[in-house]
Amino acid sequence: MSNELTRNYFELFALPEQFELDRAALDARYRELQRSVHPDRFASAGDQQRRLSMQLAARINEGYRVLKDPLARGRYLLELRGLESIDEQATHQDAAFLMEQMELREALEAVRDSADPFAALNELLARIQAGSEAQTARLAALFAEQPEGVPEAALETLQRMQFFRKLEQEAEELEAELEDL
């Protein structure tokens, strides 16, 4: 059981080390791993065995969280390939994407003053979702084209995905705020 703690998440879940993954296989393996380290199975074991079980359960939970999320999975793949840190604050040099960011931010700010704030917010959330899905598909294609090493545009794509994730969170916070009014 202790060797499971040193495996990377793909090895732990018996999945190929690639961006595209079988979500059903991930979910099934997660349930299987969780059952194997459930505290009830180690109730009569020694302290070391129980502690190891808890550590492995935490590792399984973290691995599942990373692998099921395209943004986290992309970052993790780059880390496995030697890219140590990913600067989330880096700016994008692509003028078209900078304009898109500004337009989306302006749309978010305009929601409150809209005649129908919820309709405006739903429209904005749909645009954010479409942008996020497009970047996820782009990242999948980049990793598929270059299964080894670090795809050239992967870092920029991850930064774009991060932008859409953050904007989505801000839109959801605004939605909760509007519901409370």
Image (cartoon, helix red, strand yellow):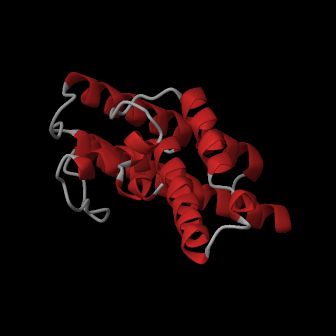
Place residue 77 in its image quadrant. top left
Place residue 177 in its image quadrant. bottom right
Place residue 138 in its image quadrant. top left
Q: Which residue is farthest bottom? A: 47
Q: Point out residue 150 in the picture as x, y percentages from the top left corner.
A: 17, 40
Q: Nearer the viewer, residue 95 or 39?
A: 39
Horizontal side of 89 relative to 131 (left or right) equals left
Q: Point out residue 179 in the picture as x, y percentages from the top left corner.
A: 82, 61
Q: Nearer the viewer, residue 112 or 25?
A: 25
Q: Point out residue 155 in the picture as x, y percentages from the top left corner.
A: 24, 47
Asked if one can make out residue 116 in the rendered structure from this viewpoint, the answer is no
Horizontal side of 96 relative to 51 (left or right) equals left
Write the residue at 18% across / 36% down: 151
Horizontal side of 132 relative to 159 (left or right) equals right
Q: Point out residue 141 in the picture as x, y percentages from the top left corner.
A: 30, 25
Write the residue at 41% across / 35% down: 136
